[in-house]
Image (cartoon, grey):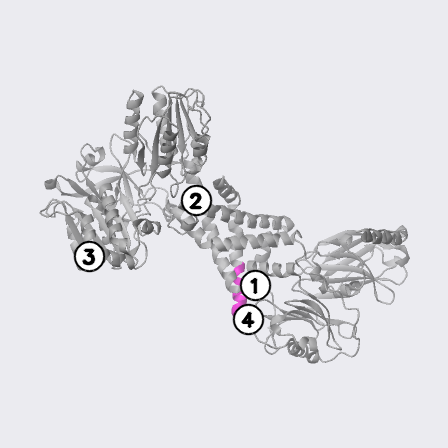
Amino acid sequence: MLRRLHSLPGLFAGLIIAFMAITGVVLSLQPVLDHARAPAAVGISVADLAQAVSSNLVGVERIVHSASGAVTAYYDAGQGAAAASIDPASGAVLGDYVPSAFFAFFTELHRSMFLGMNGRLAAGLCALAMVVLSVSGLMLLANRLGGWRKLLASAKGTWSHRLHVELARLAIVGLIVSGLTGAVMSLNSFGLIGDTSGTLAGFPSAVDGGTPAAIASLAALQDLRLGDLRELIFPYSGDPTDVFTLVTSSGQGYVDQASGALLAFTPNSLGQSVYEAIYMLHTGQGLWWFGALLGMASLCVPALAVTGTLVWWMRRRNQPRIVGNVGARHADTVILVGSEGNSTWGFAATLQQQLALAGHKVHVAPMNGLAESYSSADQLLVLTATYGDGTAPASASQFLARLQHLQIQPGLRFAVLGFGDRSFANFCRFAEQVDAALRARAVPAMLPFASVDRQSAQSFAQWGQALGQQLGHALTLEHVPTLPATTDLVLLDRADFGMEVQAPTTVLRFALPDDRRNWLQRLMRIGHGLAFEPGDLVGIVPPGNPVPRYYSLASSTRDGVLEICVRKQAGGLCSEFLHGLEPGQTVSAFVKHNPGFRPQTGKAPVILIGAGTGIAPLAGFVRHNRRHRPYHLYFGGRDPASDFLYAPLLRAALVDRRLASLTTAFSRVVGGHYVQDRLRDDADAIRALVASGAQIMVCGGRQMADGVRASIDLCLAPTGETVSALKAKGRYLEDVY
Amino acid sequence: MKKLTAILLLATALSAPGLAYAKDATLAIQTASYQGPPAYLAVYLAKPDGSYDSTLWVAGGRSSYYRHLRGWIRGISNTNERIDGITGASVGSGRTIEVGITIADALIDAGYTIHVDSAVEGGAENRDDVVLPLNSATSGQVVAGNGYVAALRVTF
């Protein structure tokens, strides 16, 4: 619901809101330019200024003091109406006043698109839509990051998603202010909010009518400083019964030209004062710096519209179509899906297909679509992701409440498979809650709770095997996520390590194909062409199996090669294929960006911790550390004589200061260590580095990552800092396999 | 509330005889071409001695801006005249409006004059942009103003 509230106005009004924002950005320059041009505020009295202007300018009719501080006099010296800029300090004429046709054009474009009242209505609705988008976006973000307090935590996801979130966080306050004030101004232009323009001060009935006195001697004008003046209208010359009309920041009234008395002064109403403040906030007129800030916030809107549309499009594209779905009452197998980004739906579709092939009648539904009873069902399979800090994803938010009303048929059994990312603190927490809730309702479990980390096709296939055993038939789940187009890469060379310590590892370097795209295709990231940084992933599709395996990249496009580090796994289809590869042979590959695993920008130190092939992306970071940021690398292997990967690079980097320190731990030597032991030995150094703002990046196997996390927590315990807190700030990154 | 009803009843009673002898008239105004937002206009009658009599039509809805229609605002300020039914939108550059107004028979050919004040935000203010005698000879005649009014025609 919330997501729809965000995406519908975004999609329908995105373009026009972006247009309004751009015109708003242009208009925000006006108060800034006016401020730059306007002379400094002066405390001259209105009487002195008006006297000077009236003697300098024949036929002056009125003097206007604008919010920027500029003074303009309108006069008619017998040749038609004209206007002049006035020096606020002396009342001297500075030159002709010509209102900017440029800003007048943009003002009209911004408030009505030259479409009259219909345009004004559209502009008002846009302002309202922007408020709805901002508030719903803020709530979505809070949900996603796990609560309002974590609103500033680092965002994860695709580059368009991250850009959307980062820009929104920068701009949100400005956009809400612009939207709300704009909506109020629109309501006002339609006359829908009370009286904001102030009551009219009636023309005074008792006018002296005597000989006009010198302007400088008029008491009411002597008492008024220029800073408080808005407008002074001169009486018609030769009409002694006419008066000065005076508008100040506090109200309006009249000044008798003979006696100098202030007549019939009407103070501004509260509504008018409030409206004037709203007007000032929206236009920045009289508050130029605030206007400039709003302008900068608005500058983000077109980018938000584009990235928002991309996020929506990717989500939609990933939504699979379930073919041959059976009704809930007739199905023997019910698959319920809890998905936020739709990737879980892809797994559900694979499961549904294979179960249907095996002769099952399968019903697939979102978890919120849990029925009150499934009369023919024997198994209930729940596939669910976890959202943010352990809460239910959008399509499962009602599930736990609805489960209490489920009528459980005898013979019904269940299995829960959680999907998630182990680098989040609350990995698969919601899936575990669902598992526990089903157990609490006394539904027998078919399988123990299982989880799939980062869409691992391997774990999914294993779970399928176990499920097949329970169902009494083979169940082969080969989940193929929709893959980007692959490129054939030619192996340039390879270097083998670790044979002697039963950890055969090879560093493979592939040649990059020629990039034949034009600049537009590169910008849009369409067509062939591999662009990557260390830490990104390459997906390699082994022959005879459509499921890609991912490897961390140790090189960037600028190196001219694609370099990975592969450990041979017994029975591992892809690793055995890669280990059998000879220079000149090719693989099918594509690049998957992994922006969540990059050193932060800045000068703070970075602690890199890797074991085995986990060194690959870290070595890539070191190789490209041209700015000599203090990188502290901890490497764990088995034997320095056999599997010290990247030893020459790291030694060279120590010499030329791309690497500040290198600490190694080898486990198969006398007095062997693991890298997590070394970290504990270096607790003081780690504490000092983290205190100075260091970021920690860990790459390697799961056990090693668990050990490292425990060690770092131990090191940091005296300071009160924790790994989870660092993670929330984006200062503890893991790439774990 | 009762008091208000009484006043309204009284007002109707007083004005009804006048209406019985009133003429429906047409007011057409074309504005000149100028740079700026739509113009505010006030069309009103002045007595033979030149003092304000009554309002015929006002173009522009923001009452705070009425002070710029200077001849008119000065006249209407000290009356209790209501202009709710005789107010329309402000008129953009080079546009034409045509509205129906009511003029009492007794005022025609009696030395009364039609006045138009005009003003544009950030532009000029014209008291007596047009002054036209209210007599049978001027009915339907097109006259030019000297400010934002390019042409005025009152037909009765």
Q: Which label belongs to residue A38?
A: 4
Residue type at tag 3 = Ser
For numbered disc 3, what is the local secondary structure? strand
Residue B78: image location, x then y, percent: 80, 64
Q: Name the residue tied to disc 3.
A: A661
Q: Is residue A60 left or right of residue A579?
A: right
Q: Main secondary structure of the magenta part?
A: helix
Can residue A381 be seen in this snapshot? yes
Query: Quick one: label 1 or label 2, which is nearer the N terminus?
Result: 2
- Number of other residues with Cα within 10 Å of mark 1, as a class: few under 14, some 14 to 19, many 20 or more: many
Is disc 1 placed on a helix, strand or loop?
A: loop
Whole-Å distance between the Cαs marked 4 and 1? 12 Å
- First along the sequence among labels 1 and 3: 1
Query: Crowdedness of circle 3 by 10 Å Cα count: few (<14), some, many (20+)?
Result: some
Residue A143: image tag: 2
Q: CA distance from mark 3 to mark 4?
A: 57 Å
Q: Residue at x 33, y 20 (%)?
A: A358
Q: Which residue matches tag 1?
A: A285
Q: Please, what secondary structure does the residue beneath circle 2 have?
A: helix
Q: Quadrant of residue A364?
A: top left
How many marks can you see? Answer: 4
Circles 2 and 4 on the same subunit: yes
Q: Which residues are magenta?
A: A27-40
Quote the CA–CA distance across marks 2 and 4.
47 Å
Residue type highlighted by circle 4: Ala
Residue A620 visible, this orientation: no
Position of B126 with respect to A249 (left or right) is: right
